[in-house]
Image (cartoon, grey):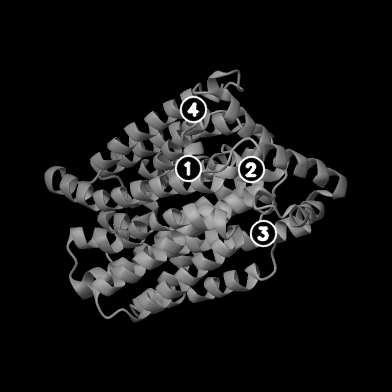
Amino acid sequence: MTYLYRITMVAAVGGFLFGYDLSLISGAIIFLKEEFALSPFWVGMVTGSAILGCPFGPLAGLWFADTIGRKRSLILSALLFLASTVGCALAPSVLQLIIWRFVGGMGVGLASTVSPMYIAEISPPHLRGRLVVINQLAIVIGLSMSVLVTYFLSFGEHWRWMFASQGVPVAALFLGLLFVPDSPRWLAMVGRSDDALAVLSRINGASHARRELTEIQAELGTDEGSFRDLLRPGVRFAVLIGVMLMVFSQINGVNMILLYTPTLFMEAGITNAPDAILNSVIIDVWITICTVVAFWLTRSFGRRPILIAGTIGMALGHLMMYLNFAYKLPLGLTLAAMFIPTGAFTLTLAPLSWVVVTEIYPNRIRGKAMSIATCAMFAASFATVNVFPVLTDWFNRNYGHPGGTFLIFLVVCLSCSFFVWRMIPETKDRTLEEIGQQWLASGAEPLSLQGAESPL
């Protein structure tokens, strides 16, 4: 268990950098707006430039994850993070800042594809959900740490040091990757069965490792792992599910609350940047607590009921956000209203979307399918990040508050709840090979309609 958790923690540093890199801009943008006199359009471009780069990481992962392996792909993502850290800290203009954040986004995209996939592939079935949630916890901790760093640096308006601070976790990722093995399923896929058996033996013991390796090799023999396999009737439905779930994880509105928390607080009445950033720390502490609770949820309940309950809770939270802005309620109630959708999201959809997409694909196509799903996720995220400030500005000009934006997100969350109930199969406590074989044998019919566990 110590060995397994050590590997997981190293891989989760990629998740930490995901949260840290994308959230760092939420504090820095306040000073960038003043220094470069940014319009709402350019605020969206600077904020979303990293997210614009994110889809290119998974596109690279289409080749790298399967060809050079999960571990070396994480090393490549660390190199991209390093280049972005140096470039953003020294950027003399908005255009160069956008370019280097785009490069960092490529690192985020590659790490966000490979880290949870790597963790899922080393995990025993009964621990897989909890261990993949560790990656989500790392994302949340990275988000929270970036807020604390930007708060302490905000007093001197040191936005360059905010970007430079990312060098510390980048160094930690480089160092940690020197001491972990590659994924046993990738090792088996490229014919290194002895190496795969050695890793599985350290995790599960020799006798269980042999049985598991036999199952892996049997499942690998059912397809070639080519792009053509992604179009097989059962598999293409799994790919569609992964894409839709990851898109819903970004367009539901909660990420916009988290990304623009300081800005929303200033619109709600806080007059100076340090206080707005400090108040956002409360939200970050809250989502960290919720992510820890998610460990218990994934152990105790199925994936489907958690996702359905969470998306309904997010919809109710967006309704509260609308009411707070529409009726000019006190700042304390605005903060309380933020707790509902952010809590529901980090308890359910945020971790479980990653858990499900690491579980539902056959071994040979997992790298390609996850890359496609993650690419779609970041494309949706980029669109949402850029539309959100424009939408809130439109509602502010026409209705005097940005609350109408949250009614749109309410509809999105209810649509996601229906999608989960209708389409997603239950994957809890099933081996990756069992799930993969069922898709390969299922044809076009969703597994959720073939006698899978009821969501109710």
Q: Which residue is mark 3?
A: 182
When the figure is inspected, residue 219 is found, relative to residue 113, above or below; the finding is above
- x and y, in percent, of residue 194 in the image: 78, 55
Relative to residue 164, is residue 114 depicted above or below? above
Give the number of the mark in front: 1 or 2: 1
Q: Secondary structure at mark 2?
A: helix
Looking at the image, is mark 3 or mark 2 nearer the viewer?
3
| SS at badge 3 | loop
Q: For the residues marked 3 and 2, what is the alpha-carbon distance in whole angstroms?
A: 20 Å
Q: Is residue 71 left or right of residue 95?
A: right
Observer-nearest residue: 52 or 340? 52
Circle 2 packing at 10 Å, graded few (<14), some (14-19), many (20+), is many
Mark nearest the camera among 3 and 1 is: 1
Q: Amino acid at mark 1?
A: Phe
Find numbered disc 1 in the image and state the secondary structure of the residue it sits on: helix
Q: Earlier in the sequence, mark 3 or mark 2?
A: 2
Sequence order check, earlier mark of 4 and 3: 3
**Picture layout, residue 245 above or below residue 261:** above
Q: Circle 2 sits on which residue?
A: 129
Q: Which of the image's four quarters has the C terminus?
A: top right
Closer to us: 92 or 261 = 92
How many other residues sit within 10 Å of disc 3, few (<14), some (14-19) or many (≥20)?
many
What's under tag 4, amino acid-wise?
A: Pro
Quarter of the image holding residue 42? bottom left
Q: CA distance from mark 2 to mark 4?
A: 27 Å
Left or right relative to 307: residue 205: right
**Residue wearing tag 1:** 227
Q: Which residue is mark 4?
A: 233
Q: CA distance from mark 4 to mark 3?
A: 31 Å
